[in-house]
Image (cartoon, rainbow, N blue to C red):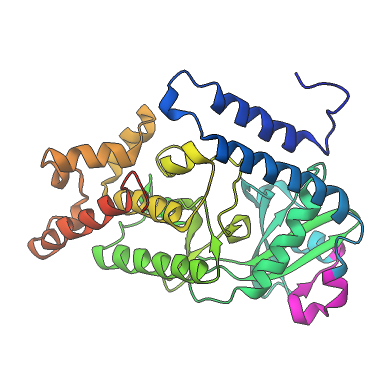
Amino acid sequence: MFDAEIASQKNMKILEGVAKLAGECLRMERHTRPEMIDVAERLRMLRKASDQGRRQRIGLFSWIRKNKPSDVCCHFSFADMKDATNNFEASLVVGEGAFGRVYQGTIRGRETKVVIKRRQSWDPYSELEFHRVIEMMSKLQHHHIVPLIGYCYEEDEMILVYDNMARGSLRDRLYNTQSPPLTWIQRLKICIGAARALQYLHESHIIHGNLKTVDILLDEEWTAKITDTGLSKTGSSSTDEATKSGFLDPEYVHTGQLTGKSDVYSFGAVLFEVICAPPVLDRVLQFEDILADWAARWKEEGNLRTIAGTYLKGKNNLRYLNKFTETAEKCLAYRGY
């Protein structure tokens, strides 16, 4: 649909950003259209991204070359990565993420389990993104953030190696699990850990921008650690990445601007998801409802206790339910200020 004179793999994301902005300007409901000051700013950011894409591809990894691998993180050869994954064996694939296919693997003589994310080689902005992730993650050191162990940039391959989280994601523990349900205390500790990770990111002027229960991983000791921090945004820059309904700040949808309060909104949706019983979560998935809106309606009608899991049925636990949901509601306030 784009003019052939300007359409290319290198320009595609910029063109898609312009097309998205045009669509927002053409909305039928007048109050949902962006202000011109926002339109001008977003066009300026798209132009800046286009200019940077042209300038930075040459010598993109000069920052890494100037720093010893030990100053950043471990450097792995492509042969190391093939050995770690049995030549990227299909049975070791554990998912698909924003960085491409995700594998479980082992390094250091099979002694250390890791998660290996292999980028799509055809992504026109993959090098820029890869460079940014390495630089950002090498500076982030926090107990509740999944650490980056190392990277591979060889033979046009771009691979990130992360510490393995033995107990999977919080989502795995909430949906269709055969394992015993998380206790109320476990859920509280997990939420507190995720909140501390977000606080650390915000103090570092970084916005996660896409927090969901699948992004909260659990180690052997059930410690919560946030992942996909490399996809986070610095400052309050706009982004054209899509996120799932219910976790996405509606103010961002209207303005295209991420702020720290965008993460607060997503965290509120996580809090509601944490207290729901599995049958409730399954129903939300089945009808593709927005969990945040759905739970808020139940609370307003005084029926929130009926959706809570059995782990919350005790008298002592129910005393904290209202306070917990009150916190979640405040996080989900329509406006962030």
Is residue 60 shown to the viewer in this render?
yes
Q: Closest to the observer: 195 or 96? A: 195
**Horizontal side, residue 66 vs residue 225: left or right:** right
Residue drawn 44% across and 29% down?
32
**Horizontal side, residue 222 vs residue 228: left or right:** left
Expressed as whole percent of the image width and height from the top left, the position of residue 90 reads 71, 46
* Residue 281 magenta-highlighted: no
* Range of residues picked out in magenta: 63-79
Expressed as whole percent of the image width and height from the top left, the position of residue 136 reads 66, 67
Look at the image and tell me in which quarter the N terminus lies: top right
Residue drawn 44% across and 55% down?
263
* Residue 78 magenta-highlighted: yes
Q: Quadrant of residue 140?
A: bottom right
Residue drawn 43% across and 21% down?
29
Residue drawn 87% across and 48% down?
54
Is residue 281 shown to the viewer in this render?
no
* Residue farthest toward the front in the current orientation of the protein: 37
Expressed as whole percent of the image width and height from the top left, the position of residue 323 reads 18, 60
Q: Quadrant of residue 264?
A: bottom left
Q: Closest to the observer: 34 or 77? A: 34
* Total count of labels: 0
Expressed as whole percent of the image width and height from the top left, the position of residue 269 reads 35, 48
**Horizontal side, residue 317 vs residue 291: left or right:** left
